[in-house]
Each structure stands twice: as structure tokens, then as C-alpha cells.
Image (cartoon, rainbow, N blue to C red):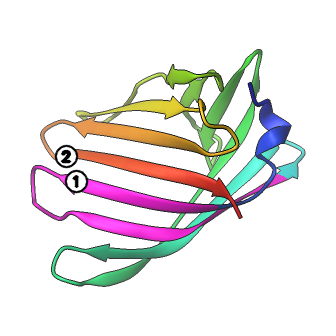
Amino acid sequence: MPVLSDFIGTWSLSRDIQDAKYGQNGQMTGQACLTASDSGLLYHETGALVLTGGMQMQAERRYIWDSAGAEIAVHFDDGRDFHHFDPAGVAVGTSHLCGADLYNVTYDFTQWPQWSATWIVTGPRKDYTSLTRYNPA
């Protein structure tokens, strides 16, 4: 079972997005870098996202990860709570409500150090599944 410090480093990532609401399916390739800081780990993800029809754009997101007992807490880069998860086996993370849209995540650490995160997002504005696979870079 990995602990917070085991995530430090650079991870290659690939993401598949299946959008049931708008049909804007996509694939992203890039990397996630996790670096130590006073507040835990800084997560910085960058990559190229290609949508159905060939439209390409650069994507980026940042989070703060920290220890919450045996779990890992994920915060938005401004410090607001996002979700938390237990980094063991197949782990269902806590849900996050954004307006009326509900974000649910399941992590899979059974092939560590390869791991994945599957987000299922539903609500009046969104209906998609996003699967991100991480591998040591």
C-alpha cells in the first residue's frame, strides 16, 4: 500500500473521456508531477487533450495532496477540500458536489506502481466518465 511520499516524482498519464451528454469524447496524454511542499504534495498535471473531431488543446490542473490519517486528502490549489481516498487496493474516494453536478472517484492501486483514477460525473450540466492511468515516468 503506497503512502503519500511514494507519489513524489513524475508520472506519465493517459486519460480517456467518454462524454454521454455532449459527445465530446477525448484522449489526453501528458504527465503529473508531485513535489514535496510544506502543505504536503503539490500535484501539477499538464498534457495535450484531443477531442472528437480532432480539436486539440493544452490541459492543466493543480491540486494539493496531504495526509489525513491513513488516507490522502486532495484539495484544490486554493486550499478548498476536494475529496479523499485510501491508497490501497481498489478504493472508492469521497464524493464531491460541484453545484448540482456530482463527482465520484474510484482509484485502483492493485498494480502499484501503476495506478488509475476513474471519475464518474453526473448532473444537469455533466454526464461523463474519465479514466486516467498513471505510470512512473
Check residue 28 for magenta coloring. Answer: yes
**Label 1 is placed on what type of residue?**
Gln
User: Would you place residue 54 above or below residue 115 in this image?
Assistant: below
Q: Looking at the magenta stretch, what is its main secondary structure?
A: strand
Residue to which mark 1 is pinned? 18
Residue to which mark 2 is pinned? 126
Q: CA distance from mark 1 to mark 2?
A: 11 Å
**Label 2 is placed on what type of residue?**
Lys
Magenta range = 12-35
User: Would you place residue 91 above or below residue 119 in this image?
Assistant: above
**Residue occupying image coordinates x 15% and y 81%:** 53
Check residue 74 for magenta coloring. Answer: no
User: Residue lying farthest front?
Assistant: 111
Image spot of residue 136 (x, y percent): 71, 57
**Residue occupying image coordinates x 27% and y 45%:** 129
Image position of 84 (left or right of 38): left
Along the line of sight, which residue is nearer the eye, 67 or 31? 31
**In what quadrant of the picture does the N terminus appear?**
top right
Q: Secondary structure at mark 2?
A: loop
Task: Please report whichever mark, 1 or 2, sits nearer to the chain's N-terminal start.
Answer: 1
Image spot of residue 36 (x, y percent): 87, 50
